[in-house]
Amino acid sequence: MTKVLIVDDSQMTRNFHAYILRSAGFTVIDAVDGADALEKLYAEGSIDCVITDLNMPNVDGLTFIRRVRKEELFRDIPIIIVTTLDDNVDRKEGLRAGANFYLVKPIQPGVLIESVRMAIGG
Amino acid sequence: MRFLPEEVEILAGIIEEAPDYLSGLEERILALEQGWDEELLDSLFRSFHSLKGIAGFANLTPVVTACHRAEDLVKELKSGRTLPVPAVVDALLGVTDFVQRFLERIQNALGTCTGGVLEIEFADLNEREAVAKVENVLTVEEKVHEPVEESQSTPPLLDEEFEKDALRDFLGELDENLAHAEQTLLRLEESFRSEDVDVLMRAFHSIKGGARLILSFAPEDSQAEILRSVEKIAHHLEDLFQAVRDGKASVDEALFQETYQGIDLIRNLRQALETGHPGIPREVPGIAPELKTGQITQKEGAATLEAFLNIAGQFLETWDECLSTGSQENLAYLVRLSEAVKNGLIRLGLRDAVSLLEELKIRVGEGDVSFLREARGEFVELLESLKEKGGRTEKPVSGAAPSAALSGGLTHTVRVDSEKLERMLNLVGELLTLKNATRTFVKKIEQEFSRVLPEAKNITSSLERLAVDFQSIVLSLRMVPVGELFARYRRTVRDLAKSLGKTISLAVEGGETELDRTVIERLGDPLTHLVRNAVDHGIESPEERERSGKPREGRVVLRAYYRGAYAFVEVEDDGRGIDPQAVRMKAVERGIVSSERVLQMSDQEVLSFLFVPGFSTAQVVSDVSGRGVGMDVVKTNVESMGGRVDVETRPGRGTTVRMRIPLSLLVVRGLMVRVAGERYIIPLDFIRETVKVSLERVREYFNGCFVEVRGEVLPLVVAEELLLGERVNLKTRNFDFDLVPLVVVVGEEGACAMAVDGFLEEGEYLVKAVPEYMRGQGLISGVTIMGDGSVVVILNPQELVK
């Protein structure tokens, strides 16, 4: 069972992405911000892929990615950034912080699914 | 089960109608025990079939399913297979009982219903038991005999028809619901209104219900998958707006994005449904559903490729950064990213290319950057070839389903089969013909039977009035408010403006103006071109607008109104306008006109160059428009409807493109004239005046004839010459008092006088199309049939003037 963690402060984005990924057979867990996501990561233990927004309250996406990468246990979890077209700087920053690649909104459902598959491999 | 208020009404209708089909059903089922004939079976089949049909209106899926299975059972009997009769009777009675109990439950609930949403619990009615009984009979039988092939391959025609109809209705409704939802969504984006949230919920609710209904007919697997996807998406979207209504979610960009995506997705699935049996063609452009259970995804190949190209693009970017800076951080990232690229290649089935990445990972891991320089070319080549492959399947056509916007989801409408409409129209034609015949007849008897004349005249005038009323009703049936077409462009403007980084509002004026549906259909393309032009070239960027003292937000207006026998449709923008000077220069540059000539032309004349194929003054050729195709398309389309296009522009202030379109393409007011013993009709729209002038005023010059009319010298054509191709010398003709009857016709290129043999009468004529071979250089625009059955040609003065 492949587990994906969706981190986004917009409930609707979470719902929609979760819905798409569930339809492709993934198990989906979601978190409303970086802090929530870190908690869920520790609680779940094994997560196969993280999809995260950058702009979030409390702990933002960049901080979240840096913290994840600091943790030995989570160093190899693929992280996909979901970003908007105009936020070029943060996106680059996110990659440097340790994300694997980014997706630009709006994301076609099929592309989301395929991207997760490529991030996980196998 | 929940029923919305409008569904409750349908329920009441069902309760009213159901007894028609249920009455005597039990007796007829029991009669099976005494043996049966074709007639009995047909009557049973029809009863269940009708019950299924009406239950379908309110999405009473359990009833639909049960009746459908009962139908199947009767079908089996009809096909001549032996079944255990008592069990059949038992099963059919079971279904009947179930339906009856179901309907009773509804009736009781309706009795206590106080308006609003109605909740009815049906779970305890045990639909499964009723259906299971039928299934048992069918399967027991199948175990006794070997599966009988032919009985499966010849289902009764009626049933297939019904299902096809149901699917067609579903698709029609789906289009309406989607169009409606999209319009509402656009409105909601502008300002929040709670009613709109309800409207959206309802639209998605209906889509969901419709999909479920069709699913209950047990369609083919491929269709069932698509329908389930549609149902799921609609369900999800309904939930989204329910959450908004219940205050559990906010209305934000993400919601809109999701909903637009959902709508697009459903639209694509719908496309697949229509074209997709038995399987979806692989080359469906854009998103087509994955046919694996429950998956909603793009056509797999396209999505995989797009996902891969996104990752590979980032990979290449990082690659290049490594080549220029080679920082440790970048190299680490490159290695990390190479994993996903490798996985992508494997998913695309390009295992051969994987070794390249494996080598990259090792070499770069060892700190060997030179490999990056060597292998870059190979990787780029791989990417290019993949992009090229993708280019062919990508790019879904956006703003599809014009019929959706046209069939009307906003106003209360009745859908009319266009074929029926066509037939009615032909009837009107006959009626008009008869009307004319009667008039001729009355004239004839006027001389002989004066006694019955008053009565005959009465009858004639009643008939005339009737015919005219009938005509106007039928013609109005074909009229569609243009607003529904306009609404399509909200999305176009929104998406386009966004992609260009502009803020633009679209205003619609006179959306209630009605136009013939054929006109509306043909307006679609021109409007698309004009709207895109306005957004892309007309409206400036917000910064530029601010600098020139305009509000940041640009404004595009779609406007329609009537004037005289015409409808006008305008696209107006408050952008930078078109500089006549730029048009002049471009025209000379393109060799369309000499530089001497162009300086003598007025600004208005110069603007007509915009319609020359391939002409564009746009400084930047973008993806959107400005390639110079477009304006000529606008002109051709509009002129093919007998209309014309004008451009009005004020540099720095904006541009208005105005299309003038005849109100109806079907009836023309015209003047009948006599030419060489034949009758011809000239549409009044093109006639400026009719005069009789003395032969003396006709002058012949070496290059043609001219005539002086009220002090104005006009070129003169002789209709007979033009139509029959024979030289005619007017001077040798015998005109009364030597006065030549002239029709002064005006076209785009000016006016001219046409000499005819005589004026006959003015009237309204129903235009019938003429076959291509008869059109003869466009001189003839149609024919009409006269009271005596003779055919009269309608001329196209536009060509005459040329």
Image (cartoon, coloured by chain):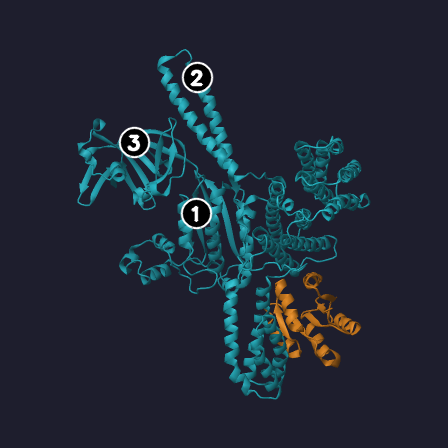
Chain colours: A orange, B cyan
Mark 3 or mark 2, which is nearer the start of the sequence? 2
Horizontal side, residue B137 vs residue B371: left or right:
right
The amino acid sitting under disc 3 is Glu
Q: Which mark is residue B509?
A: none
Horizontal side, residue B329 vs residue B464: left or right:
right
Same subunit, tags 1 and 3: yes
Identify the residue position indicated by label 3 in the image: B678
Using the image, name the chain to which the residue with label 3 belongs: B
Same subunit, tags 2 and 3: yes
Q: How far apart in space, not on screen, are marks 2 and 3 (Cα)?
A: 30 Å
Percent x, y for residue A8? 70, 67
Quick one: which residue is furthest to the front in this view?
Answer: B145
Residue B600 appearing in the image: yes
Q: Is residue B699 above or below residue B244?
A: above
Is there CB contact under 8 Å for labels 2 and 1? no
Horizontal side, residue B63 vs residue B161: left or right:
right
Percent x, y for residue B497? 54, 60
Percent x, y for residue B692? 26, 31
Identify the residue position indicated by label 2 in the image: B456
Mark 3 or mark 1, which is nearer the start of the sequence? 1
Q: Which mark is residue B659?
A: 1
The amino acid sitting under disc 2 is Ala
